[in-house]
Image: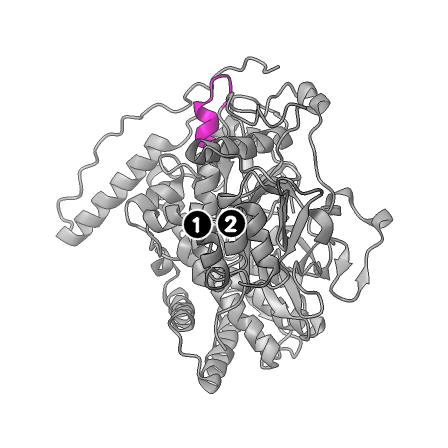
Amino acid sequence: MAQEQQRPQPSTQEQEVEETPAPAAAAPATQEQTQGVDDLLEDIDGVLEQNAEEFVRGFVQKGGQ
Amino acid sequence: MSVRRVIGLETEFGVLAPSQPGANSTILSAQVINAYAATVRQGYGQLAGTRWDYADEAPLADARGWNMPRAVADASQLTDTPRELTAEEIALAGGDVRAGETLYAEQDTDGHVLMNMVLGNGARLYVDHAHPEYSSPETTGPHDAVLHDQAGDRVALAAQRRIAESPGFAEVLLYKNNTDNKGVSYGAHENYLMPRSTPFDDIAAGLIPFFATRQVLCGSGRVGRGMTGAEPGYQISQRADFFEAEVGLETTIRRPIVNTRDEPHATWEKYRRLHVIAGDANLGQVSTLLRVGTTSLVLSLIEAGTAPRIQLREPVAALQQISHDPTLQTVVELSDGRRVTALEIQRIYLDAARAHCRTTGAEDAATTDVLTRWQDTLDTLGRDVFAAKRTVDWVAKLDLMNRYRDRDGLSWQDHRLAMMDLQWADLRPERGLYHRLAGRGMVETLFSEEQIARAVVEPPEDTRAYFRGRCLSQYPQDVLGASWDAVIFSIPGRPGSHRVATPEPLRGTKERVGRLFDAGLDVGRFVDELARGRT
C-alpha cells in the first residue's frame, strides 16, 4: 500500500535583490563585468535553498563505493 | 599510442527526499530506477527492466593474483549477489517505490521491485548499496565517454522529474557529488580496458603519482576538510580525504588510490579492466574529458613501458595536501628527495605522453585534443588559477563562491557556502549551480543538448554496447537478463533460455550486427542467425 505522502513545499522563494549601481568611474569593460557578476549572484540568490543550515544538515547519505 | 581505448564511467548519485528526513536511501534509489522504467515504458510502450546476470561478477578477485576469502570481506564488497528489497523492508520504511500506476504493475504481480535496468543505450541503471548508479555503456575513447556520462545525468534527471510528477510521492533530488560532508563518500568510477600482459605492479607504480596530482585538472571542489568536512576551508577534490591506502581491493572501506578489483567483464586471459575509484564526479564536460583522456594516455605509457619513473614518498598524504591547497603551491617529496608541485608532476607525465605520441606517430584528432587541453590547462593553472574557471570544475566552483563571499563577507563556515557546494551538484538545470553557470555560457561544453539526448537512447556504435542496447530496444520482451558480457533471451516456443556471450568488447558493433538488427527478424531467427556467425 502506498502511504500518503505530503507533496514537498517549495522551499525557496524568489528573493528581491536590490540593484547595485556600478561605480561611475569604472571603465566600460569593468562595468560590464561587474554587472555580469551581479546578475550571476542574483541568479544564485534566487535559486539557492534558503534554509541552508537545515537543508545541509538533512543531507545524510549511506556509504557508497 | 592514442587516447583510443575501451572506457566506461560510473556515477553513484547522492539521493535525498527533502520533505522526508531520514527516508531509507535504498528505497529512494529504487524509486529512481522504477521511475525511469516508467519513463522508458511511456516512450516505447514496452518494458525495459532487466535482471542482471551475475554469472561473471567476481568482486573479490584481486589483480595482484589472489582472491579475498568471502568470510573476511566487508558485506558491501559482495556485489555479486542481487540486492532485493523485500516487501517487509519497504513496509517498514513506510515507502513505496512505484511512482505511478504505470510502473511494472502488470509484470510484477508478486510485488517484486525493480532494482536493475539495462537501457537501450547499453548502459546499466541500478541500485548500488544505497545510491542510484548509472554505469555508462562501453565507449572507445574519452570524448564518447564524456558524452555517455552526460547522458547518465539526463537519465537520472528524467527519473527524478517522473517522481516529482507522480501523485503521492515526495520529491527526490539527485546530486552528482561524492560526499555528504558527514563522513560518507560514494564514487564516480572509471573503467579502462587494458591488456592482461601489462604487469599490475607497473600499473600501480605508474598511476599513483599521476592520481595523486590529476585532481588539479579535474577535481570538483569541496567546502570543508577531513572526512566529515569539519575543518573549515575549500579543497580541490571531493574524494581525496577518503583515501587511506596506496593499493587495495576495497572500494567502500580503507579506500586505495589504486584499486585491484579484477573483474575484466571480458575474456580473462586477454584483458584486465582497470577500475579507478580515485576520481571526483564531474558536472563539467571538459573536466571529465581531462580526467579520462589524460588517464588513457598514461595507461598507454605504462603499457609501452615509458611511464615516468617517479615515486611519491608518501602518496596518500600528498593526495590530501595537494587537495587542501587551491593555490597549487604545495610541494610534495619524491622518493629521490626532489620536492615538486602537483603541476610539475603533471608536466612530467604530459612531457612523457607528448614524446611517446611523437615517436609512435599518434596524430589523431582526439589524442591531439587531449594533449593540447592538458598542456593548456597546466599552463593556465600555473599562470593564474582562476583563468581556468571555464573548464576546470573546482576552479569554477571556487570562483563562484569567492564572488559570493566577497559580496556578503562570508567565512568558509557559513552554511550558505556548504549549501552552494551541495547545490552545485543538483542535476536540475533550474536549481543546480553548475547548470546555472552553464546556462549563462560561463563554462565550456563539448556536446549539445541534442547530442546528449541522442546518447540517452542510442548506444555507442563501436562496442558491444551496441549489441546490448539494440537487443533491449528491439526485443525488450524477449530479453531475460543482461550483463556486460552476455544477453540472455527467452525464445517463444523453445525451452529454457538462450545466452549470447559478448566477451569481446569491440565486437557486437554496428558494423558487425547492425544489418542483422535492421532485418527485423523475430527473436528466434535473430539468435539463430547470430549463432550461425553471419554477423
Q: How is the image coloured?
A: one colour
> Pointer 1: residues within 10 angstroms few (<14), some, or many (20+)?
many
Residue at 33 percent of width and 40 percent of height: B407
Disc on the earlier residue, 2 or 1: 1
Label 2 is placed on what type of residue? Gly
Chain of the residue under label 1: B
Q: Position of residue B438 (x, y in %)?
A: 33, 47
Badge 2 is on which residue? Answer: B469
**Which label was assigned to residue B458?**
1
Q: Is residue B351 above or below residue B240?
A: below
Residue at 43 percent of width and 72 percent of height: B367
Q: Position of residue B174 (x, y in %)?
A: 50, 36
Determine whether label 2 and label 1 are within 8 Å by CB: yes
Q: Position of residue B444 (x, y in %)?
A: 33, 55
> Pointer 2: residues within 10 angstroms few (<14), some, or many (20+)?
many
Q: Give whichever of B127, B508 is nearer the camera.
A: B508
> Is label 1 in a helix, a strand or a loop?
loop
Q: Is residue B365 above or below residue B43?
A: below
Chain of the residue under label 2: B
User: In the rendered view, does B393 fall on the left or right side of B475?
Assistant: left
Indicate whether residue B463 is drawn in magenta: no
Residue at 38 percent of width and 39 percent of height: B409
Look at the image and give the residue range highlighted in magenta.
Answer: B159-170
Label 1 is placed on what type of residue? Glu
Indicate whether residue B164 is drawn in magenta: yes
Q: Position of residue B293 (x, y in %)?
A: 48, 65
Q: Give whichever of B15, B397 is nearer the camera.
A: B15
User: In the rendered view, does B413 fall on the left or right side of B187?
Assistant: left
Is the residue at mark 2 from the same chain as the one at mark 1? yes
> Is label 2 in a helix, a strand or a loop?
helix
Residue at 50 percent of width and 73 percent of height: B344
Q: Is residue B205 above or below residue B249?
A: below
